Image (tube, grey):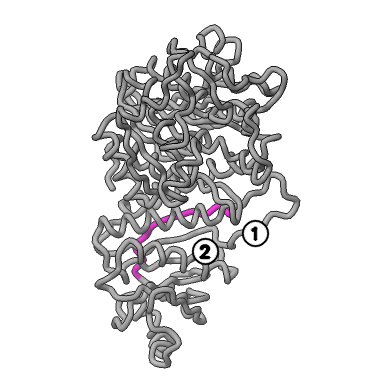
Amino acid sequence: MTAISFTARNIRDVVSAKTHCAILPVFHKAKLTGAALQLDRASDGSIRSALALGDFAGNPGETLLLPGTGGAKRILLIGCGDPNKFDRKSARNVSKQLHDALCSTKATDSILHLGLLKLKERDACWLLSYLARFLTTASYRYTETLSSPKKAMKLSKLIVNASKELPVPTASSALRDGHAMGLGVNEARNLANLPGNICTPTHLARHARKLARNAKKLSVSVLEEKKMREMGMGALLSVSAGSDQPAKLIVMHYEGGKSKDRPHVLVGKGITFDSGGISLKPGAKMDEMKFDMGGAASVFGTLRAAIEMNLPLNVVGIVAAAENMPSGRATKPGDVVTSMAGKTIEVLNTDAEGRLVLCDALAYAARYKPDTVIDIATLTGACVVALGSHASALYANNDSLADDLLEAGIETYDRAWRMPLWEEYNAQLKSNFADLANIGGPGGGSITAACFLGAFTKKYRWAHLDIAGSAWNSAPKGATGRPVPLLTRFLMDKAGRER
């Protein structure tokens, strides 16, 4: 994939600035000003001619590529619509238009003349951050098991000509943050896209150590099955019992804050392949169960973004990694296992395995005396039925934490929707033979799964993100990298990073 660099400058002489492509955002029926006016004059009125002929009107979705002038080899006009209706949705559309138009060229560098949009500082920062993130994620291509991967656009450098309203250091910071968030998304996507015969629990452990080798503030420890057994993690180990792949509890410490600062803990479900175990899944789309470690992938991706941003806070990433397979050793429906917290669990369905690995990881998280704990999991098909692919389901035992996550999702357009955790749902998890059953029947399946996890999170502020609908797409098939943007923005807010 193409690695894109992002920089901001104050370019005084627009005409002589050398670039493969000068990008001019143009509003509908707006007079040419600033950089657009200068380039129009230098090109003997080519931009005004295009407007007069009706070849380009500045409507949303419009693009027009013109011959260059001065130092610019090409001029790209991007339609922005009504200036009074230019909002974040419009800004997202402009980002996509810009990417698609550049893909049709062989331009390796470009200059975006931001001042033409006349945005306030906060809006300009949001646009630059989103644009850098979008272009970074749009350049992602899966390559690991392909002999001839698809090619991305040629662009390797984007320069932003900052506006009067936006100082260069502020613009540069917004671009860096967006780029870092995009790298985190790509990190998560690449891990989740790997096939299950490559991306095993052992592979995830190796990847964590590789990430730590390149980051001074990150350290990694891995608990093997023997240690987990000594600690009483019978729920997690019941999932890996039928597999030849040993489970791993991967713990990553990012120490960007002070030693006394309580960490934010991210716990990811890392089922590297989910056959359903003895409660075997249907064959159709079972290949997509390599994506069942999307929660773990998002923990890796969020930590990658935090490292890139050098966020001044402490984060602990815990990945409960296992493979769920049927065999003579596998856990059977009706078996009772004991969790690290001492609670016994009747396993009524071995395909409800994510909550079994998570409950032990959540119990383990308490040792860090965390400020917050957020678990992320492709947990239930019921979540997909309820919310589809547009929103992740959010559950929390603390209103303030829930609000912070919802706001982070809105800010990054990686949205979540809060679901109930009412006491009444706990009745569905009662068992005659254990403290809890691991499923609660057909009604409210995503809710009862969250209630199950809630039984292990009484000691701290906790939120659960069910990303079964948002973590990957079936057509075209591939991981989305969500909710890395939401989680990264949440950590940025906790670190005091301005929006």
Relative vertical location of residue 164 with respect to residue 187 in this rendering, above or below: below
Q: Label 1 crowding class (10 Å Cα cut-off): few <14, some 14-19, many 20+?
A: some
Label 1, on which residue? 151
Instruction: Name the one closer to the observer, 205 or 480.
Output: 480
User: Within the magenta stretch, is there residue 63?
Assistant: no
Q: Is residue 219 visible?
A: no
Specify the segment rendered in magenta. Answer: 1-12
Q: Residue furthest top?
A: 230
User: Which is nearer the N-term, disc 2 or disc 1?
Assistant: 2
> Is residue 162 left or right of 321 when viewed as pictured?
left
> At label 1, which amino acid type do we have?
Lys
User: Residue 488 placed where, x, y %?
Assistant: 39, 40
> At label 2, which amino acid type do we have?
Asp
Q: Label 2 crowding class (10 Å Cα cut-off): few <14, some 14-19, many 20+?
A: many
Disc 1, SS? loop
Q: Residue furthest front?
A: 432
User: Residue 148 placed where, x, y %?
Assistant: 73, 55
At horizontal 66% and vertical 20% (from top left) the residue drawn is 330
Q: Residue furthest right?
A: 147
Label 2, on which residue? 109
At horizontal 55% and vertical 13% (from top left) the residue drawn is 228
Q: Is residue 25 visible?
A: yes
Disc 2, SS? strand
Relative vertical location of residue 219 with respect to residue 88 in this rendering, above or below: above
Q: Quadrant of the rendered structure where residue 263 is?
A: top left
> Is residue 287 left or right of 235 when viewed as pictured?
right
